[in-house]
Image (cartoon, rainbow, N blue to C red):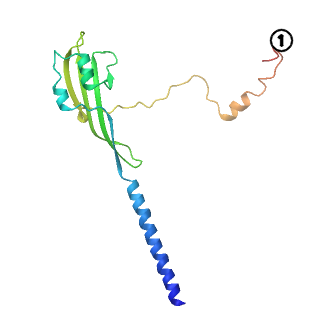
Amino acid sequence: MNRTKKNIRISALAAKCVTGAVVLTVAVSACSSRLDSHGNIPDQEIVESIRIGKSNRAQISEMLGTPSARATFDQEAWYYVGTRTSKFAFMKAEVLERKVLVIRFDDKGIVQQVERLDKEDGRDVQVVDRKTPSKGKELTILEQLLGNVGRFGGAPADDGSAGL
């Protein structure tokens, strides 16, 4: 009888160890970083085949596809943007690589300039955290609730709509 209790204790301990190992393995594997690619990073060979003063919009579109963006006020600039990021669990994504290819055209659609930018050329945009002031008094919840008491249910309108 003493031997049976000892075997049961060993079995329970082994089960706890196996369960702990499985839980630890799942927890560690769930926290691995995830790599993501967004956008279009053109091959160097394709970019080198662009001829300034000779290539046109149609040729660029055929070689590189649709641009990621076009200049807002100047439709003569096309931007091809590609980004690779790494994200670990719930943390903010870290930009590993960013490549931007800027192609500028003249009025006739002929390439005038090809510019390459990368992560170091980028700048963080500072968000301005301000509130727009509103006119009037700020009411508390109680003032808002009690302020409407007695406003409704008055005499019916003259047009016969009965307060509708």
Residue 18 shown left or right of residue 49 in the figure: right
Q: Point out residue 38 in the picture as x, y percentages from the top left corner.
A: 33, 35
- For disc 1, the neighbor class at 10 Å (few under 14, some 14 to 19, many from 20) is few
Q: Position of residue 62 (x, y in %)?
A: 26, 22
The relative height of residue 17 versus residue 125 in the rendered view (above or below) is below
Q: Residue at x 61, y 29 (%)?
A: 138
Give the percent coordinates (x, y) of residue 79.
Answer: 28, 24
Q: At 71% across and 32% down in the image, what residue appears?
A: 145
Q: Secondary structure at mark 1?
A: loop
Which of these two is toward me, 103 or 163? 103
In this view, 23 is above or below 92: below
Residue 58, picture quadrant: top left
Q: Give the residue type that dot 1 points to.
A: Gly
Vertical side of 84 occupied by 27: above or below: below
Which residue corresponds to the image point at 52% horizontal and 86% vertical from the top-left?
4
Assign the N terminus to one quadrant of the image: bottom right
Q: Which residue position is annotated with label 1?
A: 160
Q: Residue at x 39, y 53 (%)?
A: 31
Q: Quadrant of the C terminus?
A: top right
